[in-house]
Amino acid sequence: MRAILTAASALALAACATGPDYRTPATPVAAAGPFLSTGPGATATAPADESWWRLYRDPVLDGLVADALAANTDLRVAVARLGRARAALRKVRNDRVPQVGVGAGATYGRASSVQSLPGIDRQGWRVDAGLDVAYEVDLFGRVGRNVEAARGDLGAVAADLDAARVAVVAETARAYADAVSAAERIAVAERIVALLDRSVRVTERRAEVGLTTRLDGARIASLRDRRRADIPEIAAERQAALFRLATLTGRMPAELPPIAASRTSTLRLDRPIPVGDGAALLARRPDVRAAERRLAAATARIGVATADLYPRVSLGGSIGSTGTGLGDLFGAGPLRWLLGPLIKWNANVGRARARVAGAEADTQAALAAFDGTVLQALEEAETALSNYARLLDRRGALQAARNGAETAARITRAQQREGRIDSLAQLDAERTFADAEAELALADARISGAQIDLFRALGGGWRAA
């Protein structure tokens, strides 16, 4: 046994790894600078916040995110896949140590006369036990490259788990934001209905004293009823968001705590969103890290395939004994042993070269996938930044339009009471104000969605998990 280990150590010192050594791709210079689409007052160049949902200062949202990270079913699947990748790494690591096998058996039978020595009973029990040791000398780095590939696979699966966490946090925040935004839109719609209802009552009183016709009241009542009809649709959207929130947090719909539906105002930020720069984005995004790890694994597998072009050397030894009973086995029974190297070389070099070419093609594909992931990450971040900035600009214009419509509606109500304008002018002013109010509430909901899109594009949320 000592001879085996000595020879293995000497050969291991002389071993060399085949295939290219992996080097992490450098960040493109054009991608490392500030983003192009940052808007003044909307974003800041400070490093992005990993726990970005806490910027909303909503303890209910914080609790829901924690629940989702603990119980989401997609995350449970991703965690199981990570466990499998760890097991695969342990398996290939074991190829670096001697493989030991122990065997024992007992048989009862009759041997032929030519197989038995004179004076030995030809019929009876035969007991056999032995110990086998084998060690592959990694002369050309096959085992080492296999370990490198398994480490790359493990890193990619771990990054996939981080990406799943990013998605779950973002979708949980989005479901919550949709629910609270819908609640605010319902409140706006109910306020518009109440306002139009007052206009209907005023118009009806004026019709009773002959200052207008009942047609005017019917027109405003029709507008009020149309606005009231919007409420059930928005309520259905809110309920769907709450059901989605329950699923994301690993609950049945009936198990969602009532506090999750308690907020009735849209999520808003009181500070610019910290976004960092392109270099920080690429270092933070889990999908970029996953693509880089898959590239590392593919590169290592070139070495695994290349090692098959060379002999595979193993050192082995065996010791055992055979006897007619346990006393013979462990006593003075016949002892056998053997020691020696085993060289295995596949003569079909063409197949091995084809595997090398396939591994090189896989590496080129992994490199292209990595480059594409980098480009997509930058595209998503720039698009999310641009959309957010444009939605803020749009909201400013809608706010001004809503304020103007409110002033016009208030003036027309006063003029209509004084009989200075007809009901059609009032109806037009009321309709314009109702549309502006509803559109502003919808814009607020879209802004909260755009914020979550931006946070997701920035790739935060996994490190806090």
Image (cartoon, grey):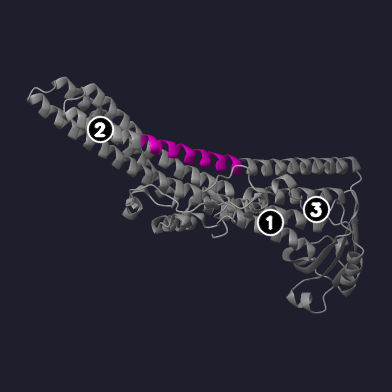
Relative horizontal placement of residue 420, taking residue 9 as reference (left or right): left
For the C terminus, which image quadrant? Answer: bottom right
Where residue 134 appears, as percent x and y from the top left, is 82, 64
Q: Nearer the viewer, residue 163 or 375?
A: 375
Identify the residue under disc 2.
Answer: 411
Identify the residue under disc 3.
Answer: 22
Where residue 52 appears, as percent x and y from the top left, is 51, 55
Q: What's drawn in magenta, residue-wise?
A: 380-402
Identify the residue under disc 1.
Answer: 88
The type of residue carrying mark 1 is: Ala
Relative horizontal placement of residue 9, taking residue 204 as reference (left or right): right
Q: Secondary structure at mark 1?
A: helix
Frontmost of labels 3 and 1 is 3
Relative horizontal placement of residue 369, taking residue 60 as reference (left or right): right
Frontmost of labels 3 and 2 is 2
Where residue 348 appears, as percent x and y from the top left, is 90, 42
Q: Secondary structure at mark 2?
A: helix
Where residue 304 appears, as percent x and y from the top left, is 82, 51
